[in-house]
Image: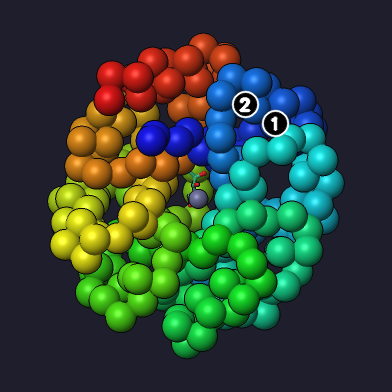
Amino acid sequence: MLIMAPSILSADFKNLGEDLRRIDKAGAEYVHVDVMDGEFVPSISLGMPVIKSARSATDRVFDVHLMVNNPERYIDDFVECGADLITIHAEACNHLDRTINQIKDKGVKVGVSLNPATPLCVLDYVLDKLDMVLIMCVNPGFGGQKYIESSTRKIKELKKMIDDRNLETDIQVDGGVTVDNVRMIIEAGANIIVAGSSVFNGNIEENMEKFLAIFKEY
Ligand code: DX5
Ligand code: ZN
């Protein structure tokens, strides 16, 4: 099943509750929340108090993407403020396996994300523990960047790796996704689609409808 996960990085933060209700009503199953620490990535976005407060606006899955170095320091806090799924970057963990276990032990879903230059082989020994792999299709840090073409081959190779092992791991894509390239991304094997600027720029309902109409083709 294809899932739409709007990234609230591009939402109107002075009306965040309203934007959350709009994407919820328009059929977003996940709310993608980008947490940036100004160290792993150049920018700083938002943290626990915003997530805690936003949590009450919708029952949808809170999908928290931690672009944070040494994320093991904050797992308990993000679970407490309402994360249902926590994604960490392989590049940001000294002990990736341990941090994956830490997230699973808290009873929430776990994802691992890879930057565009990071090869899939870093997942070899942990893939069977994961609920989701997030393929970054831009260098993380900002919304509104252009899709990096090599991501498509990476999604295909990941899909094959998952199928070869008879796993059901979700493949999430994030960065530069638009209504023009989403078919190619779905056909490569992705099933959870993150989109920031292409949902929140312009009319949210119309943008969501365009994505969901494409989903129906599959
Ligand atoms: C980028 C973030 C993304 C971002 C995507 O570092 O992880 O979630 O919001 O934005 P768009 O869809 O505009 O590329
Ligand atoms: Zn993200």
What is the quadrant of the N terminus in the image?
A: top left
* Residue for badge 1: 20
User: Disc 2 residue type?
Assistant: Ile
Judge whether 121 appears above or below 150 on screen: below
**Residue 23, disc:** 2
Whether pointer 2 and pointer 1 mark residues with C-beta atoms closer than 8 Å, the reply is: yes
Apparent side of residue 145 relative to residue 70 in the rendered image (left or right): left
Left or right, residue 157 beside residue 57: left
Crowd around label 2: few <14 · some 14–19 · many ≥20 (10 Å): many
Kindly identify the residue that appears in the image at 22 percent across and 65 percent down.
Answer: 165
Q: Is residue 12 visible?
A: no
Q: Which quadrant of the structure image shows residue 35?
A: bottom right
Within 10 angstroms of label 1, few (less than 14), some, or many (20 or more) residues? many
Residue 72 occupies which quadrant of the picture? bottom right
The percent coordinates of residue 110 (x first, y second) are: 51, 64
Question: x and y percent of residue 128 in the render?
Answer: 35, 71
Q: How many marks?
A: 2
Q: On the rendered image, what quadrant is the C terminus found in?
A: top left
Q: Does the beta carbon of the residue at mark 1 sit less than 8 Å from ligand 1?
A: no
Q: Secondary structure at mark 2?
A: helix
Seen at 50% across and 55% down, the residue is: 141
Where does residue 142 sit, x and y in percent of width and height?
A: 50, 48
Please name the residue shown 18% across and 50% down the image.
156
Q: Residue at x 28, y 19 (%)?
A: 217
Query: For this rendering, which residue is in front, 129 or 138?
Result: 129
